[in-house]
Image (cartoon, helix red, strand yellow):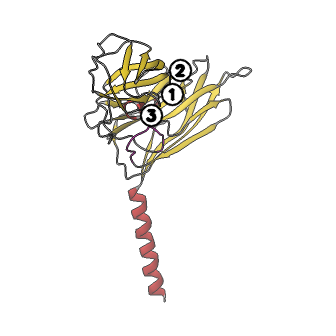
Amino acid sequence: MKKGMSILMGAAALLAAGVLSAQEVKTFNKAADWNKSPAITDGEDCLKVSKNVMLVSPRFKIDPDKTYTIKLSVRAENIQGKDFSWCLAGFAVFDKKGVAISCDNVNVVNGTLTTVAADAAKGTSVLTVKDASKVKSAPYYTIVAGAKEDLSDLPNRKVLARGIQKVEKKGDVWEITVRGKLSADAKAGDAVRVHSMGGYLYTAGSRNVFGKWTVMQGKIKGSSKSGWAGNKWPVGAEYAQFVILANWGAKKLETQFKDVSLTIE
């Protein structure tokens, strides 16, 4: 019996050791762990940020099959009245060549794939397409060229225009008036699609932080075929950086961080 118990305990210990060895914990509690900035300094027991600033970690390779957990505690000093420090935490992502992938490279607006109905020259503001029935006017929409129905063009950086001012049906075609100018020529028959802009992958979300310590945390695992969400890596992502946007409302506050970690398992 004793021998059997010893074998079981030994197996349990080996299993625990395997679990522990498979888990990697990175900490980011010193100014040296982030991008160099005079606004990021070491406090006695916390990391201090003296103004609105973006904290950026060194770049690392990602494995979509693993779970990446961000966790941090944050608070604001010099709080007066209804003041707060707006903080966001997550990841910036990059493709295999180290080129950044942004929200509008992958965040497809469903039902907007169409073809150009008439040539449009670079520098003009109107794009005529065969169907824009699912397209809305919005400053955060972009139009990309080289779109494919199977989404194999993603991440797509061929941005023709940023911001849609007006959408009108004109007979059998539709006219999309963009907020700026077309960045390249669009030829009749070219496939285009609308994407939506956004920020970073805010895996740990965003918080209005006051004087008490507040915990922010979140997890990300797996890859998406399209779209932009904090719980899955976007298509094409192979590298990432841990980012924190501190006091992003640019108030005259000191924001403090402690117990900042990235767990990979």
Residue 71 relative to residue 232: left or right: right
Q: Nearer the viewer, residue 205 or 41?
A: 205
Q: Where does the image place residue 66, in percent across and percent down from the top left?
A: 39, 52
| Residue 45 in view in this figure | no
Asked if the residues shown at circle 2 and circle 1 are in contact, with their CB atoms under 8 angstroms apart, the answer is yes
Residue appearing at x 72%, y 20% in the figure: 80
The quadrant where residue 252 appears:
top right
Residue at disc 3, secondary structure: loop
Q: Position of residue 181 (x, y in %)?
A: 37, 12
N-term mark: 2 or 3: 2
Amino acid on which disc 2 is placed: Asn
Give the dominant element type of the magenta stretch: helix, strand or loop. loop
- Residue 53's mark? none
Residue hosting label 1: 245
**Is 161 situated left or right of 99 in this image?**
right
**Residue at coordinates 39% horizontally, 63% vertically from top-left?**
18
In this figure, which residue is indicated by the disc labeled 3? 109
Residue furthest out toward the top: 123
Mark in the foreground, 2 or 3: 3
Query: Which residue extends farthest right?
Result: 81
* Image position, residue 198 (x, y; %): 47, 28
Could you tell me the amino acid type at mark 3? Val
- The residue tagged 2 is 52
Q: Tell me which segment is drawn in magenta.
A: 223-231
Picture residue at 27% right of the left edge, 27% below the top = 189
